[in-house]
Image (cartoon, rainbow, N blue to C red):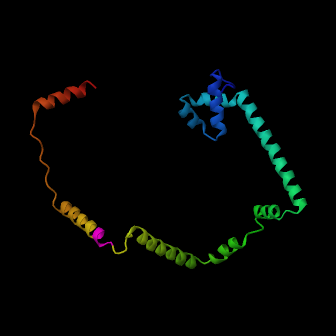
């Protein structure tokens, strides 16, 4: 069980707490700061870290309360934007564009056809911008790839036997001595 608190320097403790507040795991903090994981756990279990975490939670609670009050004031004034945002957040309201997308893409065949059309248009756009596009009349590149494939097949069909170097007793003795002294 980890002891609460730590005798590490204050700056190190502050850095551990800061990295933890940013969402880093204990392992990552330990690796980054080159300290042991149990030290990270001890620092985070200490009174300084607990006080900072408690203060942050309290600050977040106050901000949520203020946001809730502002939302109610805005709704009381009759703000349409606020009302729409609340309804969207509740999942009750969707914009016209969202409903069109949801309705149009219920059918997977339509989705596939639209994706193929977008792909065709992007190929045409690439051909216009760069002078050529992969798979669209690029005969030189296709011929080069075919030649490389043919050469690879030839090499695989006719492997050349590897010639072994002549035996050198001096080199053998040196290598064996080096292996022994490692």
Residue nearer the viewer, 177 or 80: 80
Position of residue 50 measured from the top left corner of the image (x, y, whole percent): 73, 32
Q: Nearer the viewer, residue 154 or 69?
A: 69
Q: In which quadrant is the N terminus drawn?
A: top right
The residue lying at 76 percent from left, 61 percent from top is: 89
Q: Residue furthest top?
A: 7
Q: Is residue 91 magenta?
A: no
Decide which of 105, 70 is in the foreground and name it. Answer: 70
Which residue is outermost to the right?
A: 76
Residue 40 shown left or right of residue 152 in the figure: right
The answer to whether 162 appears left or right of 30 in the picture is left
Against 6, is 157 above or below?
A: below
Can the viewer see residue 1?
Answer: no
Total residue callouts: 0
Q: Residue at x 80, y 45 (%)?
A: 63
Q: Which image quadrant is residue 38 in?
A: top right
Q: Which residues are magenta?
A: 138-142
Which x, y percent locates residue 76? Answer: 90, 59
Q: Quadrant of residue 99?
A: bottom right
Magenta span dominant secondary structure: helix
Q: Is residue 174 visible?
A: yes
Q: Residue at x 77, y 35 (%)?
A: 55
Quadrant housing residue 165: top left
Residue that appears at 56% across and 32% down? 30
């Amino acid at each position: 069980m980890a002891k609460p608190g730590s005798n590490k320097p204050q700056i190190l403790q502050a850095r551990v707490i800061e990295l933890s507040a940013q969402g880093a795991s204990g392992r990552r903090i330990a690796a980054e700061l080159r300290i042991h994981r149990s030290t990270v756990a001890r620092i985070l279990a200490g009174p300084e870290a607990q006080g900072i975490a408690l203060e942050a939670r309290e600050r977040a609670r106050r901000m949520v309360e203020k946001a809730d009050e502002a939302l109610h004031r805005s709704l009381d004034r009759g703000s349409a934007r606020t009302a729409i945002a609340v309804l969207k957040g509740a999942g009750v309201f969707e914009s016209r564009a969202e409903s069109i997308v949801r309705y149009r893409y219920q059918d997977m065949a339509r989705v596939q056809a639209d994706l193929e059309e977008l792909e065709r248009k992007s190929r045409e756009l690439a051909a216009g911008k760069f002078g050529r596009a992969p798979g669209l009349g690029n005969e030189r590149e296709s011929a080069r790839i075919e030649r490389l494939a043919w050469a690879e097949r030839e090499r695989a069909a006719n492997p050349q036997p590897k010639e072994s170097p002549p035996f050198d007793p001096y080199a053998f003795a040196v290598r064996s001595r080096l292996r022994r002294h490692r």
